[in-house]
Amino acid sequence: MAEARAAAERDGVAGGARRGPCWVSLMVRDPAAAREFYGALFGWEYEEGPRRLGPYARALLDGRPVAGLGQLPAGTGLPVAWTTYFGTEDVNELAATVHACGGTVGVGPLDSPGAGRLALVTDTGGAAFGLWQPTAHAGFAVTGVPGAHSWSELLTRDTASVAPFYRAALGFGTRQEGPGQVTFTLDGRPVAAALGVGRARARERGAGWLACFEVADVAASCAAAVRLGGQVVEEPATGLRGPTATMADPEGAVFALVRTDVARA
């Protein structure tokens, strides 16, 4: 866990733009219910955040920002989902690069007053993610501890077809870990991963970035999520980074529980 915190500091969490995953944000129909679910599951408290896209709150772990929860704008047809944001010094330039590399810019770039500037984009495989240029809000204040973001993983039909996009658009290095498994790197350090899930599963659930949250005990947290109204999407198992389980919250937003310190031990 100390390694995760040190990596976060190197990526610029304390100030400036963090080039890797810098924030995760959930958009839901019922923010109050979502706050209750995640607050009970992860021990989060909340403070009001910028309202550029509607009601929005920052989730706090021991007083430090770890995620965002907002209300879906009415009539947009957008899905209930967690979005992983990647940091940049210039969101306008990066959004243009995403477009030039074959991605799509769906929202923005636009200002989030008193916080930063953002854009919502999709990669060449249809997975949505965000771009974040910080001003007052740099992103995660802590990662890799129970209740905080630990990792983001791209679930896509075929990693070979999207890896070139992330190399060209976000400047990631890629490291093949096994069939259909790729680690994204910055300066040689792992910052995210991609998993090829095949045609059928990608069509069923859609391509997307999976936000993974650190917990002390995956099985216990999985059971707690179910008691709170969530559902098990994939039962607890051992993954590349340790024990993991994929869950859906009461509105259907998919996320993962992980215990990465086991993998590092």
Image: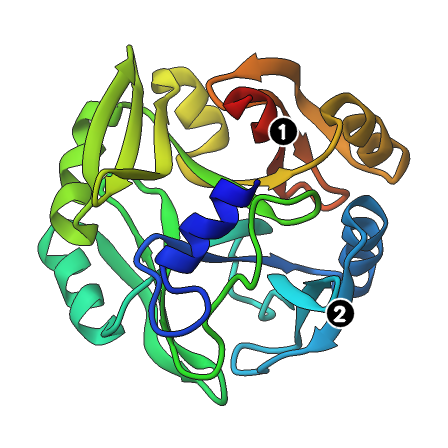
**Could you tell which of marks 1 and 2 lies nearer the N-terminus?**
2
As measured in the structure, the alpha-carbon distance from the residue carrying label 1 to the one carrying label 2 is 24 Å
- Residue drawn at x 63%, y 29% is 259
Q: Would residue 229 be found to the left or right of residue 264 on screen?
A: right
| Outermost residue to the right | 227
Q: Which mark is residue 259?
A: 1
Q: State the image quarter where residue 146 is shown.
A: top right
Where in the figure is residue 5, as x and y percent of width and height? Answer: 51, 50
- Residue drawn at x 67%, y 31% is 247
Where in the figure is residue 185, as x and y percent of width and height? Answer: 26, 39
- Residue drawn at x 57%, y 47% is 149
Where in the figure is residue 32, as x and y percent of width and height? Answer: 81, 64
Q: Which mark is residue 46?
A: 2
Q: Would residue 179 be found to the left or right of residue 30 on screen?
A: left
The one nearer the camera, 181 or 8, is 8
Is any part of residue 248 visible from this angle? yes
The one nearer the camera, 14 or 33, is 14
Image quarter where the C terminus lies is top right
Q: Amino acid at mark 1?
A: Arg
